Amino acid sequence: MYSRIAGTGRYLPEKVLTNFDLERMVDTSDEWIRTRTGIERRHIAAEDQTTSDLALEASRRALEAAGIEASDIDLIVVGTTTPDQLFPNVACLLQDKLGIGGMPAIAVEAACSGFLYALSTADKFVRLGEARRALVVGAETLSRITDWKSRDTCVLFGDGAGAVVLEASETPGILATRLGADGHFKDILYVPTGVSRRKPPPGETADQTIQMRGNEVFKVAVKKLGGIAEDILERTGTPKSELDWLIPHQANIRIIQATAKRLEIPMDRVVLTVQDHGNTSAASVPMALDVAIRDGRVQRGQMVLLEGFGGGLTWGAALLRY
Ligand code: ACO
């Protein structure tokens, strides 16, 4: 038994913050942001909009694309780093908003790899016969943990949600998923405080906002993304030349270009959406997948590699035949 993608959806909040808007907020320029990151604009959730609201909109679109009702779902897995509240978890809140109940509702916290972690989890349930139709979501309101006074980070992040309906199938589908993490890198990309740790650690003054040593993250990202892609291709006996599409985490165009080069995939077979919404963490991969399916680039039967990388550090990949 395999799981296959039956439908996808995405949602971006209405409010758009351009690079030119940011020029008025911090000492930066459109030129710097575009050349260093590829980002042109990002979307920001309204004050009363939470992560589960964004997830709901993306989920409705994915359910519609799959041609099923919310009540047909028997598993919900949501990847997020920015939950609405401590508990109930975002998957439970989404379940309530969809008007369904009873099935497991799992929230996965793996920063920007959150969707890959969620997808891999749901895939196991489907393969084991414990779920027939799973709703898998990546959703974030990163604007709530962004330091809007710091040009080092505030130009990078945005809000959004992407969703996928997985269904059981006798033909693939998801061929393999690979996940990895290395907690030793906990100090290069992190939020200093949270629930159990309420005060910043000694020597640190930062608050509940994203802190990052960008250069170091960049180097590890390129290495790990290239490595995990090669690993999943090797394990499944798939030559690089058989890949139709690479859909990577949308954090920085230069990381994406470096990964594509290592995999010998030309950029016209890489889905790029970072310019339109910046780094939306767990939401970026399912949103990019949805864009490429809806605009007709990703066709049924094609081979697609999804990849994520984020705080933890964590990383993940999924190889699938769409
Ligand atoms: N505008 C103008 N100048 C800036 C800005 C800005 N927004 N930010 C930094 N600078 C300056 C720096 O101060 C520095 O100035 P200096 O040379 O006078 O000291 C100069 O630009 C170069 O800074 P670098 O940090 O070396 O720039 P770099 O080319 O490395 O780009 C960036 C920085 C974009 C952050 C890059 O390192 C990057 O993308 N890293 C990866 C981040 C990432 O992918 N994170 C993903 C995970 S996020 C998650 O998991 C939640």
Image (cartoon, helix red, strand yellow):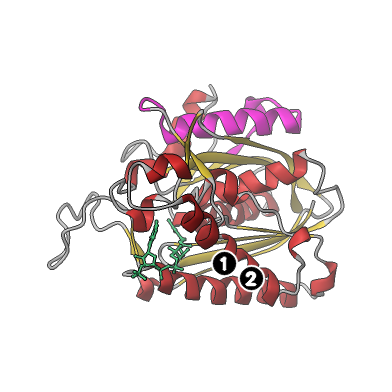
Residue 27 appears left or right of 316:
left
Residue 33 colored in magenta in the image: no
- What label does residue 255 carry, if any? 1
**Is the C-beta of the residue carrying label 1 under 8 Å from the nearest atom of ligand 1?**
yes
Q: Is residue 167 visible?
A: no
Residue 55 in the magenta stretch? The answer is yes
The local secondary structure at tag 1 comes to helix
Q: Is residue 125 left or right of residue 26?
A: right
The total number of labels drawn is 2
Q: Is residue 12 visible?
A: yes
Q: Position of residue 200 (x, y in %)?
A: 17, 59
Which element is circle 2 on? helix
What type is the residue that disc 2 sits on? Thr
In terms of image quadrants, where is residue 302?
A: bottom right
Per the image, the residue denoted by label 2 is 259
Q: Real-space Cα distance between discs 2 and 1?
A: 6 Å
Which x, y percent locates residue 287? 62, 44
Residue 159 vertical placement versus 127 (above, below) = above
Which amino acid lies under the numbered mark 1 shown in the image of this protein? Ile
For the point 73% across and 63% down, the residue is: 267
Whether residues under marks 2 and 1 lie with C-beta atoms below 8 angstroms apart, the answer is: yes
Instruction: Sort mark 2 into few (<14), some (14-19) or many (20+) by Cα contacts within 10 Å.
Output: many
Whole-percent x, y for residue 266 in the image: 77, 67
Q: Which mark is residue 7?
A: none
- Horizontal and vertical percent for residue 130? 63, 47
Identify the residue shown where x is 76% and y is 38%.
294
Q: For the magenta stretch, what is the residue range?
A: 47-75
